[in-house]
Image (tube, grey):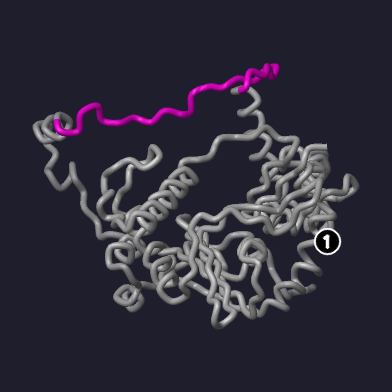
Amino acid sequence: MEQITLRPSAAARWIACPASVQLSARMPKGESGAAAQRGTAIHSLSESCFLTSSAPEEWLGIDVEGVKMDEDAITYARKHLDYIETEELRLGNVFVEQFVTAYESPAVKVAGTADVLGWSDDTGEFIIGDLKTGRGYVDADSDQMRIYALGGMRLAKKQFKTVTMTIVQPMHGVNRSHTMTVPDLLRWEAQTLIPAIQAAMATTAEAVPSEAACQWCPAKAICPAHIEPFNIMSVAQEPPALSDEQLTSFLDNISKVEGFIKALETYATKRIADGASLRGWQMGPKKSTRKWTDEQETALALHEAGLTSMQIYPKEIISPAVAEKLLGDKTVTETLTSKVSSGLTLCRSYGIGE
């Protein structure tokens, strides 16, 4: 039996739903998206600058692993490098892009690359740092960071008292940190991590759908927990004939069914791209939209036709989000904005009638 590697970056999924491991192993592996490739390039730039004592700013406009480094990329690399250099100066022992193994048996290995790890020989403090270049908010106290900490401490082969986990995510402001004791971390390992690993290796594991488990799961297209609600809803009676209980049940399953449909389409697209023939289906062009062939020539023609410059180039005030990005904080905009709902929409209720 081939050894399975469980990635710390996907730990939130396979700890919440161990069955997703063997289901995902049956899916074809897709290529990394543009966002992931960009993140990898920024990590590579940060590591190179740290090892060569160079500045990220020197790489503005230059390709790193096929990705051009723009101002945002340089900002991410600079913030990450500042964190690394601060911890190196403070602790004395810091390593960048370090592969660590938190658990290993003949059947499974839990391992991945930690962005930053280090420790103090004097205080018994161990640190784990991670750069996030995406928009989604990431908690410093996460399954991924805890696994990196376990693997890093095993690599160091030293006794530690505390672990401090830090997320560097410039899009969400200052760095976020969480500190826990090593005994607490080891209890989490024994009570949560090890049982999840054991369950992931069991062929009888049942899928446990949840937001944490399903959001990025590659196996939604073949997952029984998503297929079953789809089958039930596909043969449902017309809405007027549903009881209140049936309607509530179907509403509860909408997100699962929508996720399954999207995953099914993605899976089918990949299969066709790999050469499969699906009767009645093919890859076709997306809906086309009209664009100006030459904007400068168009502006002249529209002006000659009687439109004013203001009509051709309408201007409006920038959005609060754009202003905050340009300013670098929300201090100015907080007193200038308000949230206005455009109406009512159907949504979940919590704590009412439950």
Q: Is residue 12 visible?
A: yes
Indicate the quadrant containing the C terminus: top left, top right, bottom left or bottom right: bottom right
Q: Is residue 308 above or below residue 15?
A: above
**Residue 252 counted in the magenta span:** no
Which residue was labeled with disc 1? Answer: 195
Circle 1 SS class = helix
Residue at horizontal 87%, vertical 49%?
A: 202
- Most frequent secondary structure within the magenta stretch: loop
Tell me where residue 43 appears, x and y as whole percent.
Answer: 44, 52
Question: Is residue 37 left or right of 324 when viewed as pictured?
Answer: right
Q: For this rendering, which residue is in front, 348 or 183?
A: 183
Residue at horizontal 34%, vertical 30%?
A: 290
Residue at horizontal 33%, vertical 78%?
A: 335
The span shown in magenta is 274-296
Question: Is residue 271 left or right of 114 when viewed as pictured?
Answer: right
Q: Which of the 4 quarters of the picture holds residue 84?
A: bottom left
